[in-house]
Image (spheres, rainbow, N blue to C red):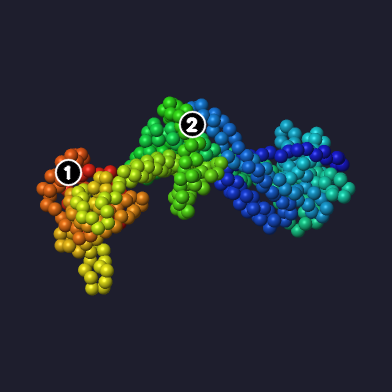
């Protein structure tokens, strides 16, 4: 047959997530390698362009899914100047044409004669023939598959891959099921889920509890139980949607870890999309933000308390200070033969006393003990912004002296556990009365 083959745009696009795109490319490469070993000379190209799909969940929240618009293209195979145009399948109602990847040809079905071969010039009940066109003359012929070897002068029967065959071979890779979501959508549903049910880590699944990550996935993708879950999340969605941008900004500004969990979370939050394998990490942004907020509140409280702490006395003056021991630890002596000294830091409410001594009574002092000492002011220093009064030659007063020296002290009761200074694996619980700001008083 001689016919002109008009061109048409037959490009079909699939919407794939990143993992599906990678799997598709790998399968196409293997498919083409097998075909080349059998004489296939065409090419198959997988083209991908970043794209999004938007929808509205049952809870009324816009959800943006990130992925790729993927097309299968290529170069139709050629042999001895003949280009493969289409495979022609004979069916009860006539003929079906299947084109190779990259083909833009469009042949009218009514120009084809099912079962006829232009090479052997016979017509019989052939299930499939191949339409070929000559690159130079433009002649179009319909050749039976059994005649291709003779017609082309090829040693083996060439493999002719069509777009349909490629798609069928890829299977689920071209299903188009999205599994990457907009960061804002993930954070919104995560915040709503934590507000409604509290935070549940992935490890809790071992005990029969549903992790927050799985609740967010169900809310985003739908499925069995999704409608009921979205109804439960609905009262929290408006507030969560408002908080999500600030939550994200706070974490990006506040997480400083250069590696590990914090660095991974920052990397996810900087992007536009959250892939399925990173969903749990993205959802954990909610408790991470809670910890960040709590840390900032503690630091603000510490700074506020530190501003009320003042130095006591003047250097060389003898003073008496009462409070609660916050640090009690052994330190090396000044020389090789010197005995280990004891470092004590005492929270006295409006002041902090610090001393390093080898006096006998200091070795029996524990964290949490009430302590009243008289000593000479050696220096005024600061540690982490907290003013400390350094005492030398401290003298311990009896416990009864504490109540007499602090008759108006507020009754703040707490239970503390203090390890022995000698490192023994023992601990004791002491209930003490202490005027304190709760400052983190270390060395």
Q: Can residue 224 be seen in this view?
A: no
Provide residue 121's location: percent of width, then percent of height. Answer: 84, 45
Residue 88 appears in the rendering? yes
Check residue 143 in the rendering and tell me which mark sits there, or answer none.
none
Please tell me whether residue 400 is drawn above or below residue 394 in the rendered image: above
Spatial CA distance of label 2 from label 1 is 50 Å
- Check if mark 2's residue and mark 1's residue have beta carbons within 8 Å: no
Q: Which of marks 2 and 1 is nearer the N terminus?
A: 2
Q: Which residue is drawn at 26% across and 59% down?
A: 378
Name the quadrant of the C terminus: bottom left
Which disc, if any, is residue 406?
1
Left or right: 196 in relation to 415: right
Q: Tell me if mark 2 has few (under 14), some (14-19) or many (20+) residues whose alpha carbon lies within 10 angstroms of its own.
A: few
Q: Quadrant of the N terminus?
A: top right
Q: Is residue 36 left or right of residue 285?
A: right
State the image coordinates of residue 305 (x, y, percent, origin top left).
32, 43
What residue would you read off at disc 2? 242
The residue at 86%/40% (across/down) is 3
The residue that appears at 23% across and 55% down in the rendered structure is 317
Q: Residue 168 is drawn in which quadrant?
A: top right
**Residue drawn at (72%, 54%) of the image:** 40
- Camera-side residue: 25 or 122? 25
Q: In which quarter of the image is residue 433?
A: top left
Secondary structure of the residue carrying tag 1 is loop
Left or right of 209? Residue 281 is right
In the image, residue 307 sits, relative to residue 260, either above or below, namely above
Residue 310 image point, x, y percent: 30, 47
Residue 142, position as x, y percentages in the image:
81, 44
């Amino acid at each position: 047959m001689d016919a002109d083959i008009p061109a048409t745009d037959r490009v079909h696009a699939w919407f794939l997530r990143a993992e599906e795109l990678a799997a598709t490319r790998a399968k196409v490469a293997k498919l083409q390698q097998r075909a080349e070993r059998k004489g296939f000379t065409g090419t198959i190209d997988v083209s991908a362009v970043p794209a999004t799909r938007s929808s509205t969940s049952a809870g009324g929240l816009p959800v943006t899914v990130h992925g790729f618009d993927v097309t299968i293209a290529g170069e139709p195979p050629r042999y001895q100047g003949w280009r493969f145009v289409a495979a022609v399948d004979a069916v009860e109602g006539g003929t079906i044409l299947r084109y190779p990847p990259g083909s833009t040809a469009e042949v009218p079905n009514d120009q084809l004669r099912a079962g006829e071969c232009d090479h052997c010039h016979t017509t019989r009940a052939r299930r499939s023939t191949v339409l070929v066109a000559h690159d130079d003359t433009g002649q179009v012929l319909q050749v039976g598959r059994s005649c291709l070897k003779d017609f082309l002068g090829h040693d083996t029967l060439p493999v002719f891959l069509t777009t349909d065959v490629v798609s069928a071979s890829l299977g689920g890779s071209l299903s188009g099921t999205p599994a990457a979501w907009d960061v804002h959508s993930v954070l919104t549903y995560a915040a709503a889920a934590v507000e409604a049910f509290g935070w549940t880590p992935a490890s809790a699944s071992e005990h029969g509890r549903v992790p927050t990550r799985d609740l967010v996935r169900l809310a985003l993708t739908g499925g069995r139980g999704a409608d009921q879950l979205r109804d439960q999340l609905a009262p929290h969605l408006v507030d969560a949607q408002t908080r999500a941008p600030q939550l994200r900004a706070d974490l990006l500004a506040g997480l400083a870890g250069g590696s590990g969990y914090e660095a991974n979370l920052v990397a996810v939050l900087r992007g536009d999309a959250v892939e399925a394998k990173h969903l749990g990490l993205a959802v954990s942004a909610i408790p991470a933000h809670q910890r960040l907020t709590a840390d900032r509140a503690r630091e603000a409280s510490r700074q506020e308390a530190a501003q009320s702490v003042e130095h006591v006395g003047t250097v060389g003056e003898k003073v008496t200070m009462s409070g609660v021991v916050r640090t009690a630890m052994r330190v090396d002596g000044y020389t090789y033969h010197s005995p280990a000294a004891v470092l004590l830091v005492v929270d006295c409410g409006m002041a902090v006393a610090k001393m390093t001594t080898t006096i006998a009574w200091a070795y029996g002092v524990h964290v949490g003990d009430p302590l009243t000492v008289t000593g000479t002011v050696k220096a005024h220093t600061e540690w982490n912004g907290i003013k400390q009064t350094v005492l030398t030659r401290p003298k311990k007063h009896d416990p009864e002296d504490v109540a007499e020296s602090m008759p108006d002290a507020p009754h703040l009761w707490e239970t503390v556990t203090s390890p022995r200074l000698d490192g023994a694996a023992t601990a004791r619980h002491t209930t003490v009365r202490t005027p304190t700001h709760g400052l983190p008083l270390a060395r």
